Amino acid sequence: MNVEKELLELCKAEDRKAQFELYKLCYGILLSVCFRYERNKEDAEFLLNKAFYKILKNLKKYDDKVPFEAWIRRITINTVIDDYRKNKRNKVDYVEEPMNVAPVQSMDFNEADRKFDAEELQRLIDQLPPVSKKVFNLYVIDGYNHREIAEKLNMSEGTSKWHLSSARQKLKELLQKLRNNVAMLL
């Protein structure tokens, strides 16, 4: 993402046209981040707008030594997490069940598996329980460690690890099920 310094300076000076131009430039990136955590379009756009407001509010603190895209992604992720924390009491996220820790057999991946695209993977991730999905996204996609995830989601590191393990196990099961369905078609 290439954002001109002049545009950022105009945004810092609260030029509404420049802010709208920046919004249009950032929209796709921010929406994709929000969609990883919230699949409902209206909720994702609400989070995007909330994040963009924070971006504009904190633009004067932006250090141009850091890539602008990384900076806005971080603000957006933090906004999504803050919203989750604020609203988690209003939602039933999951029922924690004991996890069956049987060893998972390694899968033999063929050429069709390698062509599995990001959109198909996102559909599988969307089938995860909400908390496991958030932990998986934060750890695998956004690069947070378990300590950071635990702090952000108000849980222990062990619980974060459990959700990641549970998410990986569920994804393996979903992938195997998908492979079996494809094999039946052939």
Image: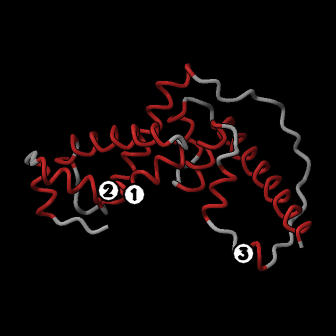
| Amino acid type at image mark 3 | Arg
Say which quarter of the image contains residue 110.
bottom right
The tag on residue 29 is 1
Whether the residues at callouts 1 and 2 have beta carbons within 8 Å, the answer is yes
Check the image and name the residue furthest to the bottom.
111
Q: Secondary structure at mark 1?
A: helix
| Amino acid type at image mark 2 | Cys
Task: Report x, y in % for residue 95.
Answer: 74, 27
| Amino acid type at image mark 1 | Ile
Task: Report x, y in % for residue 74.
Answer: 39, 49
Spatial CA span between label 2 and label 3: 30 Å
Query: Residue shown at 90%/53% (left/top)?
Result: 103
Q: Secondary structure at mark 3?
A: helix
Q: Which residue is mark 2?
A: 26
Q: Within 10 angstroms of label 3, few (less than 14), some, or many (20 or more) residues?
A: few
Query: Residue shown at 89%/73% (left/top)?
Result: 186
In-image side of 184 versus 3 (left or right): right
**Which of disc 3 and disc 2 is earlier in sequence?**
2
Query: Residue shown at 66%/40% (left/top)?
Result: 132
Q: Within 10 angstroms of label 1, few (less than 14), some, or many (20 or more) residues?
A: some
Check the image and name the residue furthest to the front.
185
Whether the residues at callouts 2 and 3 have beta carbons within 8 Å, the answer is no
The quarter of the image holding the N terminus is bottom left
Q: Which residue is mark 3?
A: 114
